[in-house]
Amino acid sequence: MLHILPNPLKLEVKVSRTSTHTLSQRDLDGVKPGGYAAILITDRRHHGPRWLLLPGGVLQPGSHTDAALSATRGCAPSELEDELNRIWSDWILDETVWSRLFQQDHIKVKAGIEWCLQQHPPRMNRSAGNLRETRLADALRRFRAGLDRFLSAEEGPKQEGFVHQYLLAHALEHVGYEATVNPIGVPDISGMLRAGARPDLIQKVTAWQPVSAEEKALKSTIEKCSAASLEALRNVLNG
């Protein structure tokens, strides 16, 4: 059964370079009620790297391991989690895109990310399963090393969380939200579904498992469309 996309949406983004993540009471209160902690799991034994969306109401303040978080039962729409992971990972996997960020030494990270997203969208990476996870783990390591060289070994880890916030907000825009990043408070990202967006169409396309080559090509094309484009297509088909 397809879920309804949460509206409004609140995300508190957590990124760690270890397998442990710390959540404060303030973090959790900032997304309650109904919001989520978006946590980047990197442990390959738990199918990392990937984002987990866990409701603030099911978590306790303190330290949480990748293993414990992966075993936590959440209620986030799986389609939303899958879409955020797909769009985010396409960017990380496309080194020709993010390497351009590190060539922009005259601008700050936020402006550099926005420039990359607008001028150099990533290619869709068609790898899946364990192969995609392995490639993504390697790409994330290279991205982190590049970020540390671009900023500094001290500033790179501090700024990485902001980079992922902007990437997740960008992914939410593709899903059908108007997303706002709040770099100094909680929640980190706030989103509202755009007027006229049809998230049900996005969900149906995401859940569709085509068999023929023609259908797979069609799904690939549709996945590149915005919610507004899907709405226009629905109107055309309905006459």
Image: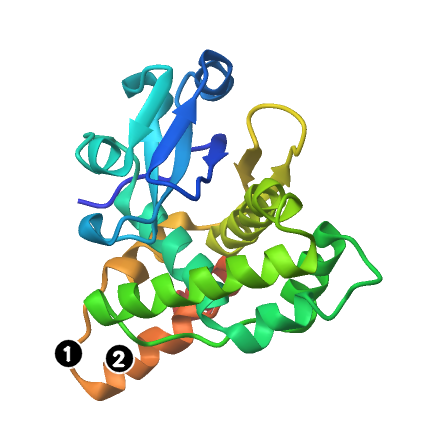
Residue closer to the observer: 74 or 13: 13
Q: Is residue 115 left or right of residue 145?
A: right
Residue 111 lies, with reference to residue 30, above or below; the image says below
Residue closer to the observer: 142 or 109: 142
Q: Amino acid at mark 1?
A: Val
Inspect this view and state whether residue 102 appears. yes
Where residue 159 is drawn, which disc sits there? Answer: none
Residue 143 lies, with reference to residue 221, above or below; the image says above
Quadrant in which residue 69 is drawn: top left
Q: Residues within 10 Å of mark 1 (few under 14, many from 20)?
A: few
Label 2: which secondary element: helix
Mark 2 and mark 1 lie on one chain; the one further toward the N terminus is 1
Look at the image and tell me in which quarter the C terminus lies: bottom left
Give residue 4's position: percent from left, percent from top: 33, 39
* Contact, mark 2 vs mark 1 (Cβ under 8 Å): yes
Residue 17 lies, with reference to residue 97, above or below; the image says above
Q: Residues within 10 Å of mark 2 (few under 14, many from 20)?
A: some
Inspect this view and state whether residue 196 appears. no
Give residue 21's position: percent from left, percent from top: 38, 31
Residue occupying the far bottom of the picture? 213
Residue sitting at x 25%, y 70%:
128
Q: Amino acid at mark 2?
A: Lys
Residue 71 lies, with reference to residue 205, above or below; the image says above
Q: Is residue 6 left or right of residue 193?
A: left
Where residue 216 is drawn, which disc sits there? Answer: 2
Label 1: which secondary element: loop
Colour option used: rainbow
Q: Which residue is mark 1?
A: 211
Give residue 44's position: percent from left, percent from top: 24, 54
Residue sitting at x 81%, y 58%:
107
Q: How many marks overall? A: 2
Give residue 105's position: percent from left, percent from top: 79, 63
